[in-house]
Image (tube, helix red, strand yellow):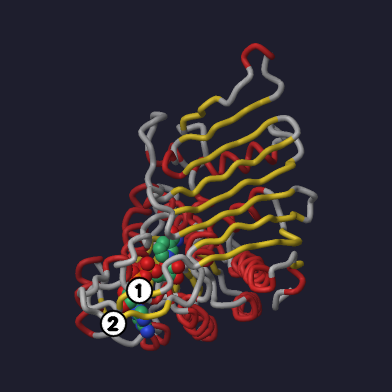
Amino acid sequence: MSTRQIDIGLIGSGFMGKGHALAFTMVPRVFDDLIAIPRLRLLADVDPETAERAARELGFEGASHDWRNLVAHPDIELVDITTPNHLHAEMALAAIEAGKHVYCEKPLALDAASALRMAEAAEAAGVVTMVGFNYLKSPAALAAKRMIEAGVIGDVWHFRGAFNQDVLADPKQPFGWRFERGLAGAGALGDLGAHVLALALYLVGAVEEVCAHATTVIEERPEATGGRGYGAGAAAEAPLRRVENEDSMQALLRFSGGASGVFETSRVATGRKVHLTYEVTGSRGALVFDHERMNELELYESGDAADRRGFRTVIMGPEHPYYGRFWPVAGCGLGFGDMKVIEVYELLQGVARQERVRPDFRDGAEVQRVIETLLISAAERRWVSTKEAAGA
Ligand SMILES: NC(=O)c1ccc[n+]([C@@H]2O[C@H](COP(=O)([O-])OP(=O)(O)OC[C@H]3O[C@@H](n4cnc5c(N)ncnc54)[C@H](O)[C@@H]3O)[C@@H](O)[C@H]2O)c1
């Protein structure tokens, strides 16, 4: 194993901050061909106590209450942004200006123009970037892509994708950054739907036109009185705040390659947990994925003998991308965090080799353009071309 080292500066230590730190810790143990070892150098969060506690718990050498110190730190080679959405652009642009490579959570920015600015700045500076669309890194998604490219399902005719969750379905779940337009941008669409859009672009190709409908079913929520992120709580008598973005969206998509699509996302989908699903229908077969059964891919091939035709369940194993790096036997199963391990593996290899990795800021900006188009469509209640979004 190489002794080349990449010093990581992580900003934010919530749900995703922990996820990224775990992935960086795991990656050298899973991938024995890693050419650069991550060093958890510095963690920044909003105040000294939070930053120091998180640094200690997640294994970072140092802590700062000011992310600008982290970006300016000469040791840091890769800046990792896991803060709420409104901070991504400012932090990434500062990191790029300081010559750092940048790993940023999705959605890339609040709007398409900012996302495009980030992509252009990164390309001009020649730094490597990656956006945390981790569902693209599950062995099943990578296997689906490989099968589509090999023509297993023929020409792609149709995409059906959804990300439904009930994590915010309780009206007592307090108001937090995810409900505020200035901090989150879109609601369920940016938080959950963005992942499905990234998969749609990856598996099927560019989206040309959309027609969307959005709703907010829980219009007010209590102010948080403690905790953060999904773990926040509210006192019974807490004042109410108006929710500023959509709880759910349904949409039709038209892809530039001619395929059509249906898209749905909800953060109030009672009973659904991480119900990220997609179905790609082609002229000779179809593929179906459900993240709640993330180690399975359903495959239908029209070429099968007529009396045996039907969807079959392919259980992920060493024959599928990256699975064998974790376990030698099919069916052991990978989990959510393992997608992040694969994501940071590709990122570190790219940084060490100074090569483009995907999905990068350009890909993230493309997703942002579709998000913006969907929001215009829902607001104006009409079909909208993605050319109408900023950044087209
Ligand atoms: N890829 C995924 O599957 C996935 C899952 C969840 C969240 N996310 C994304 O990750 C990002 C963070 O979401 P989360 O759920 O971890 O949020 P969170 O609220 O749990 O954590 C956010 C963290 O950022 C810190 N922070 C806020 N302002 C800061 C500042 N100015 N300087 C330094 N730190 C600051 C907070 O203190 C907190 O530690 C969002 O963009 C979200 O969309 C991605």
Cα–Cα span, label 2 and label 1 = 8 Å
Query: Residue 9: where, in percent of width, then height?
Result: 37, 75
Mark 2 nearby-residue class (10 Å; few <14, some 14–19, many ≥20)? few
- Circle 2 is placed at which residue position? 239
Q: Secondary structure at mark 2?
A: loop
Tell me if residue 371 comes above or below residue 200 in the rendering. Answer: below
Tell me if residue 140 comes above or below residue 52 in the rendering. Answer: above
372 sits to left or right of 94: right
Residue 201 falls in image quadrant: bottom right
Query: Is the CB of mark 2 within 8 Å of ligand 1?
Result: no
Count of numbered tags:
2
Which amino acid type corresponds to the residue marked 1 in the rendered image?
A: Arg
Please report the residue visible at 69 percent of the width from the left and 33 percent of the height from the top. 153
Which amino acid type corresponds to the residue marked 2 in the rendered image?
A: Pro
- Circle 1 is placed at which residue position? 221
Q: Quadrant of ligand 1?
A: bottom left
Please report the residue visible at 39 percent of the width from the left and 55 percent of the height from the top. 166
* Residue 60 seen in the figure: yes
Q: Nearer the viewer, residue 119 or 70?
A: 119
Please report the residue visible at 39 percent of the width from the left and 52 percent of the height from the top. 270
Q: Secondary structure at mark 1?
A: strand
Query: Residue 362: where, in percent of width, then height?
Result: 64, 68
Query: Residue 307: where, in percent of width, then height?
Result: 65, 11
- The mark that comes first in sequence, 2 or 1, is 1
Please report the residue visible at 51 percent of the width from the left and 61 percent of the height from the top. 248
Q: Nearer the viewer, residue 107 or 223?
A: 223
